[in-house]
Amino acid sequence: MDNFSGQMSPDLLSPLMRRGAEFLGSRYPVICGAMTWVSEPKLVSAVCNNGCFGCIAGGNAPTDILARQIEETRSLTKHNFAVNLITIAPSYKEHLAMLKDAHVPYIVFAGSFPKANEIAEAKATGAKVMCFASTTSIADRMIRFGADAIILEGSEAGGHIGHVSSMILIQQLLFKYADTVPIFVAGGVATGKMMAHLLLMGAAGVQLGTRFVMTEECSVHPKFKEVFLKANARDAVATPQYDSKLPVVAVRALKNKGMQKFGALQLRLLRELEAGTIHRQEAQEEVERFWVGALRKAAVDGDIDGGSLMAGQAVGLMDKITTIPELVEELLSGANAELLAVKNRLA
Ligand SMILES: Cc1cc2nc3c(=O)[nH]c(=O)nc-3n(C[C@H](O)[C@H](O)[C@H](O)COP(=O)(O)O)c2cc1C
């Protein structure tokens, strides 16, 4: 199953990768972030079998399907992987309860932020817990609640995003917590060069999403990859929130008709909220259902006009589809070459 052959021995890189790799139990501290409709067992296991760390996307999958995906992933890799739970998904509570007996080695909480008892529940299964943090107070809270590692994700990332860019979060969170818990940096990471600098800054590792979409092993619709190939960084835009009466988490995706439909949906829901014909929670759930459905349309069915093309700004940094071994090799050799260049600059 493993496919480590041909990957270079990363000399300068090894010491910088050790902490993150030990935490994840993988060869390299490179996480392929969970992506709803994208991170299914074949992609996750291919990531793991090439020395990186994969995450199954819980999304809003029926609980029995998620349980089957866990089993299928186990049959395809002997390496560690995570299950990503979306705390705002209607099936979240059921997903968490199902994990009690599934004994997955890592659980990642995404969407919003988990409560203390939910982290405790996850840890009681024997899993290590990773949480996203978009501010110092959230990082403090997650660490206090028992998170074993933090994922710092800048607003450059694809999918549901926070408001602050990686550049700022690195200074706010990474520099503050790097010695407390392992911090994995996500959002806009696409090259080995960048990975090298993040490790030098204290990151335990990196998490990439958009770049893994552009691999042969990723089974999204070919049209989804084709638009990614042509897109520039500025094409991956974040959705606005029209009114605080309906708080919505911003989504970064490539501009298309599907994005405009989200504007129309917000306006309709706001009108219904004003008229009192819908409750806020119902409206927010409808928003989440919209995104899950729209992403499926684009990523699975290939409807690149009407569906959601969730992508990070890193889409502008990639111009080819590679295999995962080629991507890993490129990341490692790029990072090693950059470390050598830094060493020479310092000499
Ligand atoms: C199509 C797509 C779907 C995503 N779905 C999820 C998800 O279900 N759960 C999650 O935690 N993150 C999700 N993300 C975020 C990724 O896991 C990852 O953190 C992000 O893509 C990293 O930024 P990058 O795109 O700049 O590499 C998604 C990203 C994309 C592009």
Image (cartoon, grey):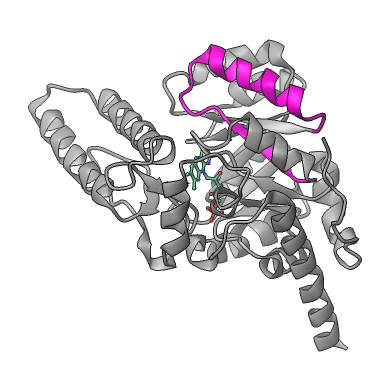
Q: Position of residue 23 (x, y in %)?
A: 81, 42
Q: Which residue occupies 20% across, 37% down?
A: 265
Does residue 105 appear in this view?
A: no
Residue 77 sits inside the magenta stretch: yes
Q: Position of residue 185 (x, y in %)?
A: 64, 55
Looking at the image, is 189 positioned above or below residue 100?
A: below
Q: Residue at x 36, y 63 (%)?
A: 235
In the image, 3 versus 249, the foreground residue is 3
Residue 194 visible (yes or no): yes
Left or right of 74? Residue 217 is left
> Would you say residue 252 sits in the magenta stretch?
no
Above or below residue 260? Residue 299 is above
Location of residue 191 (image quadrant): bottom right
Magenta segment: 51-79
For the C terminus, give its image quadrant: bottom right
Q: Dividing the picture into quarters, in which one does residue 39 lie?
A: top right
Indicate the position of residue 115 as horizontal and vertical percent values: 55, 27
Asked which quadrant contains residue 96, the reply is top right
Q: Nearer the viewer, residue 63 or 214?
A: 214
Q: Position of residue 81 (x, y in %)?
A: 72, 33
Quarter of the image with the N terminus in it: top right
